[in-house]
Amino acid sequence: MKNLEADTFLELLSTKAAVSRRPEGVTFELTYGCNLRCVHCYNPTHRALPHELTTSEICGLLDQIAGLGVLTVTLTGGEPSVRPDIGAILHHARQLGLMTHLMTNATRITPSFTDLLHEAAVSQINVSIYGATEAVYERMTGVPGSYLQFRQGLLNLAAAALPVIVRMPVTTINCVEIQACRQLVESLQMKFQYCLEIMTTITGDQTPLQYRLAPDVKVRIDQEMLPHKWTSAPEEFCSEGQSFIECACGQSRFAITPYGEMNLCTAFPIPRYDLRTGTVKEGWEILKQTVDQSHPSSRYECPTCEARPHCRQGRSDAWLETGDMSSCLPHFKEWAQLEYHTHALLDPRRPR
């Protein structure tokens, strides 16, 4: 019998799910409440408002999610651990046989919380790191004392030998510490990742974009952190048979907000299907229709753009910033063109 790595298995499953248009993964925002106030965050409130879903409503939705054949559910926020019922939610997900991932800032991870994660068989903990030093970390989070809480939480996770991936959103504030963050994480035998994308809030507020790195800085960071990327041939991009919305949204994945709205993803808050008056099964059909009925406008430039294989702009980025999914955003275009030309210069197949 052939054994597959977990990541490979999930990737194959996601591909098959997309072909059959069956959902395989859900991102469930349990709350917008958070104990941090990160400057780059797309969270619209950072507060848990009274009309967030109750424990029974969340568990009922998890029942429907499992009934639809979904395999993985990613519980996020805000900060999901601020919910006093997080234990009950995690245990319910396990009872349903769901593969649970948890996204957290780790500042509230105590030894007793790691015991809960073990008991609930959480298969992956995704931790955010905002800096390697107290000064930079707390410039990002806006909360004094949060750095020491984070470091202790990370140590607690390491001591518990839980499956952890630590991911760094890289901004103008913390970019100088990316290597130090990687060293910190890897010293604890944890996997380090970084992310260069900063987006508007889901209400369209563009304030977080002031912390976004310039395209040339992003390319330089990638060259330093991912040298193999520039010494291999780029992946071929094929749009034949793909829908206008090319990502997994509405193909194999969807998202649920703390208010019970079912959307394409957390960064693509449409169509806002109300799960308090409808069902997950019906909502999935609405999401598929949303994807299938989306078409480019006259502003659509992608098919003729030579840098398209290097572009990281999503339909959600364009929609949030301009209200038109077809818009080509200057920041992403410059970033893609820089990657295109840089890759061409470093491509080992290039005549010397």
Image (cartoon, rainbow, N blue to C red):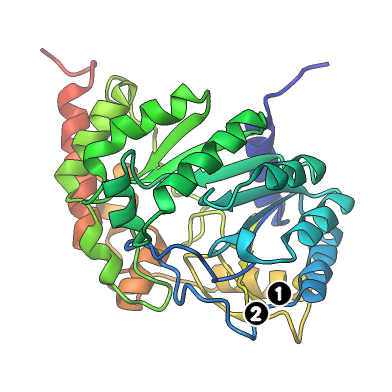
| Residue at screen point 59% across, 80% down | 272
Residue 236: horizontal and vertical position, in percent?
39, 35
What residue type is disc 2 on? Glu
Image x and y of residue 350, in percent: 18, 19
Q: Is residue 291 above or below residue 338?
A: below
Density class for disc 2 (Cα within 10 Å; few <14, some 14-19, many ≥20) is some
The image's mark for residue 283 is 1
Residue under the image location 61 percent in, 36 percent down: 157
Q: Position of residue 172 (x, y in %)?
A: 21, 51
Identify whether 305 is placed above or below 84: above
Quarter holding the C terminus is top left
Q: Is residue 243 left or right of residue 333?
A: right
Is residue 169 visible in the rendered image? The answer is yes
The residue furthest right is: 95
In terms of depth relative to the viewer, which is nearer, 237 or 209? 209
In the picture, the quarter occupied by the N terminus is top right
Q: Is residue 295 left or right of residue 19?
A: left
Q: In this view of the protein, which residue sits in the foreground, 3 or 157?
A: 157
Q: Which mark is residue 341?
A: none
Q: CA distance from mark 2 to mark 1?
A: 19 Å
Q: Nearer the viewer, mark 2 or mark 1?
A: 2
Q: Residue at x 76, y 70 (%)?
A: 58
Pick whichever, 158 or 261, lies toward us.
Answer: 158
Disc sitting over residue 52 in the figure: 2
Q: Amino acid at mark 1?
A: Gly
* Relative horizontal placement of residue 308, taking residue 63 as reference (left or right): left
- In this rendering, does residue 128 appear at all? no
Q: Secondary structure at mark 2?
A: loop
